[in-house]
Image (cartoon, helix red, strand yellow):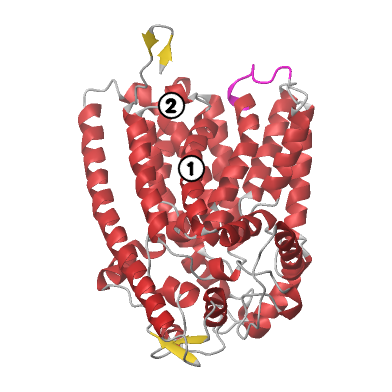
Amino acid sequence: MLNGNRKVKLKLKLWHWMLIVFMSIFFVRNLILPMVGDDVAYAFIWDGEHLGNLIDGVGHRERLTSFGDLVSSLHSHYMTWGGRIIGIGLTQLFSWEGKHLFDILNTLVFAALALLVFRVGTGKRLSEMNATYMFCILFSFWFLLPEPLETTLWMSGSCGYLWTAVIGLFFLLPYTEKFWHDDFWQNPPKWSIPLMGFAGLCAGCSVETSAPVIAFAVFLGMIYFWRKRQLQPWMVVGFVCLCIGMLILVMAPGQMVRETITEQYEEYPDVPVDMYMTLSMFYYTFLEIFWPVVIMWIPMLIPIIYYWCQPKGQRNGRSMLFQTVMLCGAAIVMAILLFVPMSAPRAGFFPTIAVIMASLSAVCELYPTFRQKPWAPRFFKSFAAIATLMFIVTLSVCIYVEWDVRQKWMVRIDYINAHKNQEVVVAPQIDLPPIAGKFFSLCNKNTVTWHDYLLVWGCDLEPREDSWRNLIYAQYYGWPKVIADGEDRRLQDSE
């Protein structure tokens, strides 16, 4: 690019290359993953009058063909299933428009999450980013996020967790900018109030486990600003609209309707209704929901604890306050999940993002002192080398498993097309390569690729003729009835 007679060169730093490589890998994995499970069901107008699109025995459904269909579908979904307007709306939009658009935008949104974690968590400008900070962010994203395949790559899950997390952090950004920098918006622009009102509504309507963390942080933030006589109208409007959005989310009429439908029609529940609020339920929610998420917080808590143990004169009061608020908000939500047996570890996605930001805040405070220690360069290089090796090994497994699944998916589609004149097409079930099971056993609920439980209970065709996945799948591709061969693996898994 020319500026007069001078040539301006774009000089990329190491952290730029780290982000570019990571996002390139993320994009390739998006391309490999097909539309599965709920992705296909949300390509149709939600039919709330007939129990929706996710219940066995689902009848004929109409494909989305216009924005009018999308609005009608979202209204029906809100009244008969749940209040996640933002996540479901995005899912239906991409299911209608096609996955290639999602693959591109999802990669950009993941990059935005990394940059927002840095800005919100540290208050630093992007010009102050370095390879160490980016390494910490990417390390946490790869190894420590709960159920990353379902929350960042799978279209339905990504729209519900990754995208809403970015929306929530965009809303939180002005509050943290004011927290880290007293001179931010000393004279707020006129558009700040409507902007924060709209952003608050969107953040509140996001997902049940992100909005409370944000609300907790903003509420305490407003008390902080009020005591410092810095409270401004946009802060109050943003918080009020956030609360309104949360009410829209949790008070959706569909919440009660879905609970009734699920209790009546869902098979093989992990916790039967008659076990609710018993020791057995809490034992299940602790081991299957709470613990898989919180155990992965330990590496992120190490720099926080180390920082808090520094002499008083070497600690930044604002950083400690920020870390405390993020940790408390995350812990409160995870404690609430102990009372929600129908939840899953992926519900801890945003609480984990909050812990990552708290940890990064501590790392940024420790970094200037650490880098001056004589042993620091060798320590950082050794840790980076080990982590990079682990990343390459686990990435290789992920790509191998995901490509294997995709190939089997495509072969099965060709097989069904070749036999679509039959009244019922019996298609082969998809089996994962053996290494996927070993990988899942090693990583438990934080595995970053396919595992049997996800395939059997969330995505693949089933040997049952009334399975909604089979019926919706056949309608999507314009086939006759399709079922999978073999035994019902859900029965085997539940035994």
Single out the mark in the foreground, 1 or 2. 1
> Label 1, on which residue?
108
Q: Which residues are magenta?
A: 179-187
Count of numbered marks: 2
Q: Report x, y in % for residue 22.
A: 35, 43
For the C terminus, the image quarter is bottom left
Label whose residue precedes the other's in the sequence (1 or 2): 1
Amino acid at dot 2: Glu
Residue at the location (38% across, 35% down)? 134
Q: Nearer the viewer, residue 139 or 4?
A: 4
For the N terminus, the image quarter is top left
Taken as a whole, is the magenta stretch helix, strand or loop? loop
In this rendering, would 42 be left or right of 234? left
Amino acid at dot 1: Leu
Q: Report x, y in % for residue 194.
A: 77, 34
Q: Is residue 158 visible?
A: yes
Looking at the rendered structure, the secondary structure element under dot 1 is helix
> Are the residues at dot 1 and dot 2 in contact (C-beta closer than 8 Å)?
no
Looking at the rendered structure, the secondary structure element under dot 2 is helix
Mark 2: few, some, or many residues within 10 Å (few <14, many ≥20)? many
Q: Report x, y in % for residue 47.
A: 71, 74
* Alpha carbon separation for disc pair 1 and 2: 28 Å
Question: Against 60, is 90 above or below?
Answer: above
**Residue 350 is inside the magenta segment:** no
Residue at the location (45% across, 38% down)? 359
Residue furthest out toward the top: 5
Residue at the location (63% across, 76% down)? 276
Q: Is residue 143 visible?
A: no
> Label 2, on which residue?
365
Q: Report x, y in % for residue 320.
A: 53, 31
Residue at the location (45% across, 76% down)? 460
